Amino acid sequence: MAPALNHPTGVTFVEERPTNVDAATYYGGGESYTRSRTYSTSHIHGYIPKKLPAFEEDWHLRPRRMSHDEKSVTGPRRFLIDVEETIRVVLEQEDTDGDFQISITDAGPKMMALGTATSNGFKTFDIRGTYMLSNLLQELALARDHHRKRIVLDEARLTENPVDRLSRMIKNSFWHSLTRRIDGDGLEIITADPKNRTGRVNPRIYVPHGEPAMAEYYRKVAKEKPHMNLDVQVLPENPDDPAYVKSLNSKPGILALAMNEVDDGKGGKTLKGIPFIVPGARFNELYNWDSYFIALGLLVDGQVTMAKGMVDHFIFEIKHYGKILNGSRSYYLCRTQPPFLTDMALQIYNQLDRSDMEENRQWLKRAIQAAIKEYHTIWVAEPRMDPKTGLSRYRPDGLGIPPETEATHFTQILEPYARKHGLSVLEFSEKYNDGTIKEPELDEYFLHDRAVRESGHDTTYRFEKRCANLGTIDLQSLLYKYEVDIGTAIREVFDDELELEEEFDLAPFPPSVESYANPHREKSRSRVQRSDEWFDRADFRKEVIDKYLWNESKNLFFDYDTVKEKQILYESVTSFWPLWAGCASEEQCWKLVTQSLRKFEVLGGVVSGTEESRGKISLERPNRQWDYPYAWPPHQIMIWVGLERYGYLDEAQRLAYRFLYMMTTAFVDFNGVVPEKFDAVKLSHLVDAEYGNQGIDFKMVPREGFGWMNAAYQVGLSFLTSHMRRAVAACTSPEVFFGPAASLQEAPLLNANVPVTHPLGLAMEHLSLSA
């Protein structure tokens, strides 16, 4: 009988180790051993030869000839790998474009022989194809992160079902990598701002007025961590004054968010930041509508506490900054974004631990109270409210040029004005910002530009030079949902009575020019809130939507220009948001689905708008990222949920399949990429738009994905049947799965002018080859 291997006590055997788990579990801990009885010169498992073979004058390990392991394997195959050496070989052999990723655009042989663990590395097995090789590179990078020099790697991690792998990485890795906290431990990460163009990189935090304990806490952090050079500033009582906010452009900083009081471990108390998720890439702060969609993904993944903390931050922002901010930086103080707080809070409330319902009820109460304040002081208050029509608009305050954009973003707009004054663009920008030069037309342009950014759709020809005047279908839908949600919560959770704790002005209802001209306002604490009022507001808004935004002849909702008093006939996929909100009639929904969906549905999901509405693209009129042919996660999720709500589950599943197919093929073909957006016509993340794409610039292994794209994948999977999920994992094209015509209501599947749709062909189009 052969002797048993003499392994140290308490070791982990690879045969007993779970395979498709997160990297910390798989690579963490000590060395893993195999139960193999084969002794060889591979001394990873403790066998060290007494005498090394000599060759001429050099002593070295002389391995046997590496023969291919051709025999059938009854058990799981595993590989014995030297981490650093294999990384070097993989990159040298396969990464022909030098981007530290293995993709279908690389021209390597797409094959590598790895030594098998059963033979202690003497026999090999070929790893073939982009997906396995890119997974190998990713696994090696993760092993390096955990300081592993040598590993026994399961083949199952290289051949893992791509749907399972991506979903697992989102749940176990990406959310963690995108987690931030604003306190002494998290400041060094969160204060980094890729959008800061001032050249001053010392971190700065702005603490709201009325939070002395928080200000003192950060001053203490600055004293304890002098290497940070942290600048702690306290904001005035009204921090969103446009002139004041403009004065901060030269000294941008992170805005303080909600904190909990905790034990400091020394018998006292201290403050600790509530964690939250950032979108990723250049967006390293808490965002408004991104957070709603991220929260949906977190709820799918069971991370209720994280999602709840993000609502806590929104409550804090409304209390101290007057609104849910576009983002938690000083240059966003005048601006909000599309409102989702009520639905976000209710979805989280429904998943809270039921062991303390009173605590849950109090938490929801704070969220609904904050939403009511935001509703009255922002969305139905002037200048956002148009009293004549009753439509709300994206119309933020602000002065000067938005400082968070890329340096050359407005060059084309500013050049004519700079020439007019005989100045360079930079000189003109400085004089315009400080008020030395007055240009009313430019003021009007930036009013609309700020409104575009508040809308979340920055930028699109749909809103060009008119956004601040538009009552958009998306905003009316969201506010209808606010009104219904608030009324429902008051009736079902708070026994039809809700007292407001903060004092603020209530907006007149119903709205009219006369009522808004009256300076006297009812105060929030003068009476309790009841559900009837909110349902009346919702009914009124539905009437306004039908009157101004629905177009019977075109079977679509359109934006309404409150200045020109006419519909803007730009076809936007947000026309389907009334389905999500529940404010479309059954007949309107039927017409949208049967007559209009085909205008937006393409191979990779739904595009933001139609090609006809966008118009021709040229050097003078470049692509805008929220126009055709781009597809964004918010639009996908909203239409999936809306269609399901009205009973069109087949259509919702078909659209979800399309988008997840596009995501999965990119993940398989491009080293695990999860980008911010896609060209849904060409099925590509290699987009040619104003900001390029986010989430694609990583080395060897994706670590974050992108916030709402991660969420769209997790939410989208919940719409698919098991058969659909298997088909997506096999990268089965929607044309094959659904048939070429039926899936698009018998309409053409793709624009005939697009010659290349295969990912490899498209990627090759974007390669820049030098002689």
Image (cartoon, rainbow, N blue to C red):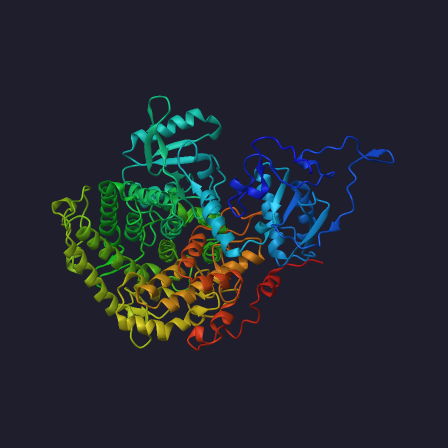
User: Is 192 on the left-hand or right-hand side of 332?
Assistant: right
x then y, percent, for residue 127 = 66, 53
Q: Between residues 83 and 676, which one lies in front from this camera angle? A: 83
Q: Between residues 242 and 163, which one lies in front from this camera angle? A: 163
Q: Quadrant of the C terminus?
A: bottom right
Say whether residue 5 is visible: yes
x then y, percent, for residue 512 = 17, 60
Residue 80: quarter of image: top right
x then y, percent, for residue 476 = 28, 61
Outermost residue, top side: 266
Question: Above or below — where is 592 with respect to 216?
Answer: below
Residue 51: quarter of image: top right
The total of numbered circles placed on residues is 0
Residue under the point 47% across and 71% down = 738
x then y, percent, for residue 593 = 35, 72
Outermost residue, left side: 527
Q: Quadrant of the N terminus?
A: top right
Say whether residue 102 is visible: no
Q: Between residues 483 and 304, which one lies in front from this camera angle? A: 304
Residue 268: quarter of image: top left
Question: Above or below — where is 708 with respect to 328?
Answer: below
Residue under the point 71% across and 50% down = 124
User: Is 629 on the left-hand or right-hand side of 98?
Assistant: left
Question: Above or below — where is 409 with respect to 4?
Answer: below
Outermost residue, right side: 56
Q: Between residues 759 and 609, which one lies in front from this camera angle? A: 759
